[in-house]
Amino acid sequence: MWAGLRSQLVKFTSIFFTSVDDYLRFRAVCKSWRSAVPHRPDHLPTQLPFLLLVSTSEPRIGAAFRLTAASAGNVLPLPNRANRLCIGTSFGWLILLCMKDRLINLFNPVTAENIRLPYLDVLSFADVVSEGDGPVIVAEKAVLSSDPTLDRDFVAVLFTRGVTIRWYTWRHGDESWTANANFLVQITVRMRDVVPYDNRTLCAIYGENDYWAVLKVDPGPPGRATIAACYAMPYCVPRTYYPSYLVVAAGKLLLAASHYDNWTASGNIIPEFRVFRLEPGDISRPAVAVEVDDIHDRILFLSPSSSMSVSAEDFFGFQGNFIYFVNKDERDELENWRVWQIVVQDLETDETNMVADSKSPNQRRLMWRAHQSDVAQWVPPNLRSCNR
């Protein structure tokens, strides 16, 4: 009589699950089990991310690819986010900007929770560029200082490009955005990537991996972000205009820098990544970078301002020391359109392979066509509730 188990025993058993899928199946056994454990657990480790396709063209419907032990597939429709541009993801939350009315929302694509942030009315005409019929905000990237479901004092940081004020902050509870001026340090090159790291700390790279900065976030009120250190990147890190990504793995900060030395037999170019472990410095101590070819049981998932890592030990069928990333197929490019595919790289051998489509009987590689302005980002499922 499984349905007759005491609720305390059912709840105790549920804490041993590490997979979201196993946890949800456990809740689905019967009504009594479902009522004994919460719908949104707090104990699960970081889950395998899904690849979210955020479309900026009509129709503005996103889709998600979920990885399985053998392949990828399971296209899941997501809510219509019309007139929204995804400018970042953090802790499973999308940061969406409406270019027309300067409205920003935080949206959880798993729980459908929505947090409306104030309008960006603090921007002046000096902070925007004219495009077509009116001014357009040049939003470079956006991140959250911490998980909104765990920290009520989280701060949203919005970085702009080519303007006098380089970023704006908003703390949960603030009625407006705060312009952050850093008079001692003026970074004039474009930001490449930025990630939350450690306790209310952001790390960013600029230019062609030329500069490295550490930003400290003060929850205030009002919330603010200031540069705590800024210096040249160590010489061992290659300067390149190809993509570079920052990712936190098991508490360590890594930099993955790509280079295009890998040509396939069909003439397509597949990038390979070199990985460096970074030790953030401070005002009196520069950063240190050490190249690594073994990240042990970690798996890296690379995408702009939303890279992440998981432990292969938590997911059956996956091996550590691998990198997953999205690559465009140069052979099939059309005007304003790109063909994308998921690539996995073995860091030990530098061998790269295309991820196959599980719905294809002959395991053909997974490919999809998208507008060149569409964004593909890895997003970890966040089942916690912000309104609990």
Image (cartoon, rainbow, N blue to C red):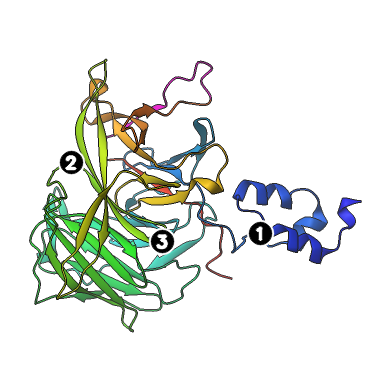
Q: CA distance from mark 3 to mark 2?
A: 29 Å
> From the viewer's perspective, is the residue at label 2 or at label 1 nearer?
2
Residue that appears at 54% across and 17% down = 361
Is tag 2's residue or tag 1's residue first in the polypeptide sequence? Answer: 1
Q: CA distance from mark 2 to mark 1?
A: 42 Å
Asked whether the residues under the numbered discs 1 and 3 touch, taking CB atoms below 8 Å apart as contact, a structural biologist would say: no
Q: Is residue 255 left or right of residue 306?
A: left
Q: Is residue 120 left or right of residue 25?
A: left
Residue labelled with disc 3: 106
Tell me the kind of residue under disc 2.
Answer: Tyr
Residue labelled with disc 1: 39
Residue 236 image position (x, y, % from top left): 15, 50
Q: Is residue 283 above or below residue 74?
A: below
Q: Is residue 222 above or below residue 382?
A: below
Please rate how many residues cluster around mark 3, counting C-alpha atoms within 10 Å: few if below 14, some from 14 to 19, many from 20. many
Most foreground residue, 189 or 370? 189
Tell me the kind of residue under disc 3.
Answer: Leu
Residue 20 image position (x, y, % from top left): 60, 50
Is tag 1's residue or tag 3's residue first in the polypeptide sequence? Answer: 1
Q: Is residue 249 left or right of residue 266?
A: right
Residue 47 image position (x, y, % from top left): 52, 51
Secondary structure beneath dot 1 equals: loop
- Can residue 124 be seen in the rendering of this structure? no
Q: Which mark is residue 242?
A: 2
Tell me the kind of residue under disc 1.
Answer: His
- The prevailing secondary structure element of the residues shown in magenta is loop
Secondary structure beneath dot 3 equals: strand
